[in-house]
Image (cartoon, helix red, strand yellow):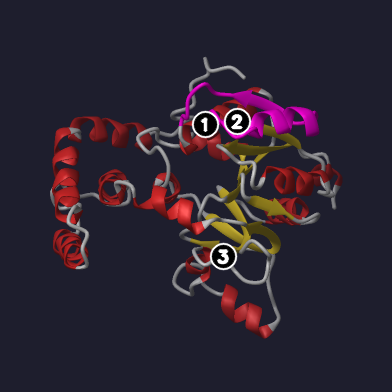
């Protein structure tokens, strides 16, 4: 590893919310990392002892405790502000249920020195590391990340591969990305913010890369995640469609109308009597808030540290 890479200042950023199930393994794994990094935890008002556990068992970890749950994106934005103000070189943003390997950060740094990209992503494995995380499999599809599967099967893996989609369970961001793209759009509370962020990266002509030599385990618990994921899912999908800067359409033509209604009617037929009403409500919500959404679109078209308020100190 070069001297420049070895001296890179890295901020590991973790947003927690009732994370006692994972926090010990998450932070213990970071202690074993071969590359030293500062760790900042932004807690979103946990009630299960997460904060007390971090304070007593991990005194080296910087901790901010929010009185209320700000959501995933806005809490991470606080950490992004900290990284900019304290002149870090990279932010390694990981979920509270993600565990790194000793060489995870080393491999990400190596990739970042060899290629220019807005986001570098390690391979995201399942909780025990036995296979790819089932959602991350989409990111290595040949249409999403050309070449990686072929090279893996032929035993000629490169350091990194350009992709057009990646999920924010583990993102390695040069701080230049924050200065150019900014933070997460606060209109998303939880889920959807990474898909929207990717559209902004692509709109501004930047790239993303997957780093096969870098791996993390993502120990998601599907029951809890799916409950949150399904909450107002149609509205979140509509917002992403409306705010996607790569789509230059009118607000009405943005949405996949036939597919949306077919999905709602299928759900209704399976016993989800709320599905059509949720779909109708999503249309009404988008129409009612279209001026706010258009203002957000305009803000996200600008180059700069959008959504990163400098007055929010840690």
With 28 as the anchor, is 120 left or right in this view?
Answer: left
Magenta extent: 41-70
Q: How many residues crowd around disc 1 within 10 Å: few (fewer than 14), some, or many (20 or more)?
A: many
Disc 3 on helix, strand or loop?
Answer: loop
Q: Quadrant of residue 299?
A: top left
Residue 84's image quarter? Answer: top right
Q: Secondary structure at mark 2?
A: strand
Q: Earlier in the sequence, mark 2 or mark 1?
A: 2
User: Foreground residue, 263 or 209?
Assistant: 263
Cα distance between the residues tagged 3 and 1: 24 Å
- Separation of residues labelled 3 and 2 (CA atoms): 25 Å
Q: Is residue 174 in the magenta section? A: no
| Disc with the residue nearer the chain's start (3 vs 1) | 1
Classify residue 200 as left or right of residue 283.
Answer: right
For disc 3, the marked residue is 133
Contact between labelled residues 1 and 2, with CB atoms less than 8 Å apart? yes
Residue 48 location (% of width, % of height): 60, 35
Distance between mark 2 and mark 1 Cα atoms: 6 Å
Residue drawn at x 58%, y 81% is: 150
Q: Is residue 55 magenta?
A: yes
Residue with the mark numbered 2: 42
170 sits to left or right of 195: right
Q: Are marks 3 and 2 in contact (CB under 8 Å)?
A: no
């Amino acid at each position: 590893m070069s001297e420049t890479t070895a001296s890179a200042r890295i901020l590991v950023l973790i947003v927690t919310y009732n994370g006692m199930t994972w926090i010990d393994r998450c932070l213990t794994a970071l202690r074993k990392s071969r590359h030293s990094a500062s760790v900042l935890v932004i807690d979103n008002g946990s009630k299960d002892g997460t904060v007390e556990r971090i304070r007593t068992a991990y005194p080296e970890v910087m901790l901010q405790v929010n009185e209320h749950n700000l959501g995933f994106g806005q809490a991470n934005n606080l950490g992004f502000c900290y990284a900019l103000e304290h002149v870090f070189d990279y932010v390694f943003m990981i979920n509270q249920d993600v565990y790194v390997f000793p060489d995870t950060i080393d491999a990400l740094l190596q990739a970042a020195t060899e290629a220019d990209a807005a986001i570098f992503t390690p391979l995201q494995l399942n909780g025990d590391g036995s296979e790819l995380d089932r959602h991350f499999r989409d990111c290595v599809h040949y249409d999403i990340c050309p070449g990686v599967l072929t090279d893996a099967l032929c035993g000629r893996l490169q350091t990194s591969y350009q992709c057009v989609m990646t999920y924010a369970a583990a993102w390695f961001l040069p701080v230049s990305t924050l200065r150019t793209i900014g933070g997460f759009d606060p209109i998303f509370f939880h889920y959807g913010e990474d898909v929207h962020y990717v559209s902004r990266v692509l709109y501004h002509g930047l790239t993303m890369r997957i780093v096969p030599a870098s791996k993390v385990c993502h120990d998601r618990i599907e029951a809890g995640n799916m409950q949150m994921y399904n909450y107002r899912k149609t509205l979140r999908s509509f917002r992403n469609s409306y705010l996607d800067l790569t789509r230059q359409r009118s607000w009405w033509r943005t949405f996949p109308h036939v597919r949306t209604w077919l999905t709602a009617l299928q759900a209704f037929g399976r016993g989800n009597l709320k599905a059509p009403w949720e779909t109708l409500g999503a249309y009404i919500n988008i129409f009612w808030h279209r001026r706010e959404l258009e203002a957000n679109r305009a803000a996200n078209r600008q180059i700069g540290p959008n959504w990163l308020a400098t007055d929010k100190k840690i």
